[in-house]
Amino acid sequence: MNDQEYAYDVVVVGGGPAGLNAALVLGRARRRVAVVDAGEPRNAPAAHLHGFLSRDGMPPAELLAVGRAEVARYGVEVFEGRVTHVERADPGLVVSLAQGPSLRARHVLVATGLRDELPPVPGARERWGLDVMHCPYCHGYEVRDAPLGVLGTHPLSVHHALLVRQWSADVVFFPHTFALTDEDGERLAAREIGVAEGEVARLVVEDDRLRGVELAGGRVVRRDAVFLAPRMVPNDALLTGLGCEKDGNGAVVTDPAGRTSVPGVWAVGNAADPFAALITAASAGAGAAFALNHDLVEEEIAAAVASRHRGEAEAGALTG
Ligand SMILES: Cc1cc2nc3c(=O)[nH]c(=O)nc-3n(C[C@H](O)[C@H](O)[C@H](O)COP(=O)(O)OP(=O)(O)OC[C@H]3O[C@@H](n4cnc5c(N)ncnc54)[C@H](O)[C@@H]3O)c2cc1C
């Protein structure tokens, strides 16, 4: 197969900030690029995004609409749909959509994000991204000085409460299913964080607002917002299907540029790094695109040198 037989140099799976920023850089590098996006970005439940210079306060959907318009200027094609699998085609890779075409590419960049698994506390899913949240850097400022709660659902929940205290002097930690150590208690007390013992029965929601946290005994502690740590599960089935290596924590292994252990397969954003925020996911996408284009250039040089050698050998055979 020669180079023209690939429809695309790169297919990007996932059109969040990581995938779109990669597509922007690759489009501007005059690469043939397709983005396939299922349209379910992780921060969709939130009304506004924060902490992204020049975009602070923008609705999440608007950031993606602007990003799509920008990549379109450079000829990047965007397909709405879900990729079901990616296979080696030797050479290259074939990306299959649930409903639609199969796209053939030299490299595939996976930017499929992650899903947040919430604890089974009634009200948590309903209010997720509104007044139940995980990241104080994203939404802490909007609830500054308000009565805040932190749910003990994760080994780092005490640390979470100590962090949230930066945004409000009125923080209550709900150990819920979490066993507090004496040291935890001392650190919380030193920062004047209250502790409401007992299992949480539900989050109290009235008039489309979180009003408080109800404990198993029926006591309600009034709170305006609650932070909790979800279990973050990368959407990495396409990567594991291709045989990408994982580390001891179950995360797909990449080098700093996003190269996985499988040649031609890249992973960026929350699919590879659960702690990437919007701007760092976008930055990872850009960084991967620089490295990916470099690898494509190197492949093209190697092919050109080999072709030249073949030409010289053939010419030598004719004249010899
Ligand atoms: C409620 C909430 C609010 C947040 N607010 C902020 C904030 O204010 N500031 C901030 O910096 N961070 C915020 N974050 C974190 C932010 O959402 C992530 O940092 C960011 O979304 C990561 O970008 P990404 O491109 O890796 O993934 P995503 O933005 O999740 O994009 C992944 C895309 O891939 C698509 N996809 C998945 N699988 C497939 C498939 N098989 N085929 C095709 N497409 C697929 C998805 O539908 C999605 O559109 C928030 C998170 C949550 C949960």
Image (tube, helix red, strand yellow):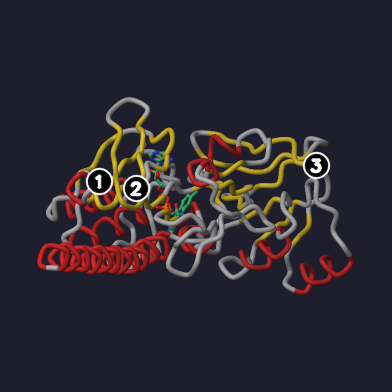
Q: Of tags 3 and 1, which is closer to the observer? A: 1
The answer to which of marks 3 and 1 sits earlier in the sequence is 1
* Most foreground residue, 305 or 230: 305
Mark 3 or mark 2: which is in front?
A: 2
Looking at numbered disc 3 in the image, what kind of residue is underneath it?
Glu
- Say which residue label 3 marks: 199
| Residue 287 left/right relative to 211 | left
Q: Amino acid at mark 2?
A: Pro
Q: Earlier in the sequence, mark 2 or mark 1?
A: 1
- Could one spot residue 13 in this view of the protein? no
Comes first in the chain, label 3 or label 2 = 2
Where does the image place residue 90, in percent across and percent down from the top left?
37, 45
Q: Is residue 151 left or right of residue 64?
A: right
Q: For disc 2, does the CB lie below 8 Å from ligand 1?
A: no
Q: Tell me the tag on residue 91.
A: 2
As measured in the structure, the alpha-carbon distance from the residue carrying label 3 to the one carrying label 2 is 56 Å
Which residue is the extreme one toward the front? 320
Residue at 64% of width from left, 43% of height from top? 212
Q: Mark 1 belongs to which amino acid?
A: Met
- Residue 80's quadrant in the figure? top left
Q: Is residue 250 left or right of residue 271?
A: right
Tell me if residue 56 comes above or below residue 110 in the rendering. below
Query: Which corner quadrant of the image does residue 145 belong to?
Result: bottom right
From the viewer's perspective, tell me whether residue 216 is left or right of residue 163: right
Q: Where does the image place residue 57, in percent across and percent down from the top left? A: 33, 58
| Residue at numbered disc 1 | 1
